[in-house]
Image (cartoon, helix red, strand yellow):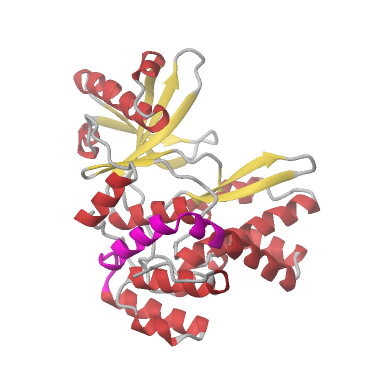
Amino acid sequence: MQGDVPSKKKVPFNVNKDLHNYLRKYGRISHSKIQYDDLLRFNTSVPLLNTEGEDTLWETVYYDQSDRQFLEKALTEIYALLKTDGDTKVLEHLGVARIDYCLFGNTNPFRVRIINRFNDNYDHFYIKKTDASRIYGLELEHILSPNRIVYLVDNRTLIEEHIAGIPGDTFIENNLNETPFNKIRIAKEFVKFNERCFVRLLGDMRAYNYVVDITPDIEGSQYRIRAIDFDQQSYEGKKSFYLPQYFKENNPIIFLGIQHMKPETVIQYQLEERSLIATRVKASRDRLRELIMIMMKDTISDEEKVTQLREELSYHHKNDSFLKCKNMGEIVLKNIELILKKDFKQSIIVE
C-alpha cells in the first residue's frame, strides 16, 4: 500500500485575526519593504540546471536595473531580520547573488541566495505566498519537533529560513551505501520521523519534501530527518497520507528498517519519540494550547476530507471520539492527546 498523492492542488487559506494576533505575540510578524508580488515583476528567466545538467524545476529570474537595486536592499534587510533580528551592521558586506522561482508546488516560492562578499559564503531564504495551513504546520514543527523554525509573516507574504540538509531523494540515491551501524541509525531516524509526522498530522512527506542532516559522531554518523514542506498540514483526508512509510519514494529506507530492525525495536523507537514529543508539549503547553484553540476555530480543509480523516483515524485507533470532531484542528488535538495519552495528566486544552 502506498500513500496517495494529493487529491488536487491545494488552495491557500487566509490568515484570520486570531492567528495574526498569535503570530504577533510570538514575534512572527514583520514589516518589510517588499511583498511576494514585487518579485513577480521579473522580465526574463532561464531554467536552473543542477551539476548533472538536469532541470531542477527552478528558474533563475532577472529584473530591470531599477527593480534590481530596490530588491537588493530590501532582500538583504529581510535576511538581516531572519538572522540578526534586524541588525543592519551586517548589510554592508551582503549582496543578492541570485533569485530563483519555482512553479512547482502550492506556494510558488522564490529562493533568494545571499552572498557574503568578504568570503563568498552564501545562504538562502524563501519568499512565498501566505497560507494559514502552512503556518500551522510551521508552528507545530517548531513546538513538537526537535527543530526550531525561523519564519516571518508580512501581510500576504511568508518569509522562511533555509533548512539545511541533503534532499531526501538525493540522500536515498547516494547515501544509503553505508556501514551496517549507520544503516541502523538511518532506519531508526526514519521511524522517529514517521512518528513525528503522524502525531501532528503532517502529510505528503515524500523524499523530496524533507532533508537529511548528517552529523559526524565518535563512531559513525548521526542522522536527523527534517520536513521542509508544510503545505499539507492536516489538509488531506486519507490517513496513510500522514505516514511517510507509505510513500514508494521512501521504500529504500523502509527496506533498511526491515533488514536491520526487529518489530519490537521499531515499537521501542516509536515509544521513545512519543515520549520526547510529550516532553516538548509539557514545555510549551501554553503556546500549543493557544495555537490549537485557534486552529479549532479555523477552516483549513473541506468537509469531505474532515469526514474521511476522522473516520479513518477512528478505525485506526479503535476510538469513536474522533467521530465527534468537526474540523481538522479538533482532529489534530484528539490525535496528539490519544497517541500521547499515557504521558498526560491533563488535557492540552484547559478550559
Q: Quadrant of residue 116?
A: top left
User: Residue 41: x and y, percent?
Assistant: 20, 33
Q: Residue at x 80, y 53 (%)?
A: 180
Q: Is residue 46 visible?
A: yes
User: Residue 341: x and y, percent?
Assistant: 53, 74
Q: Residue at x 46, y 68 (%)?
A: 241
Q: Residue at x 41, y 25 (%)?
A: 114
Instruction: Reply above or below: 252 against 215.
Output: below
Magenta range is 278-302
Instruction: Reply above or below: 198 against 47.
Output: below
Q: Residue at x 45, y 83 (%)?
A: 314
Please state, as top left, top right, bottom left or bottom right, where the C terminus lies in the image.
Answer: bottom left
Q: In this orientation, which residue lies closer to the viewer: 217 or 42?
A: 217
Q: Is residue 17 left or right of residue 26?
A: left
Q: Quadrant of residue 285?
A: bottom left
Magenta stretch containing residue 320, yes or no? no
Q: In this orientation, which residue lies closer to the viewer: 300 or 102?
A: 300
Magenta stretch containing residue 284, yes or no? yes
How many discs appear? 0
User: Residue 217: x and y, percent?
Assistant: 74, 40
User: Residue 25: x and y, percent?
Assistant: 30, 46
Q: Quadrant of residue 132?
A: bottom left
Give the prevailing secondary structure in the magenta stretch: helix
Q: Is residue 28 left or right of residue 228?
A: left
Q: Is residue 16 visible?
A: no
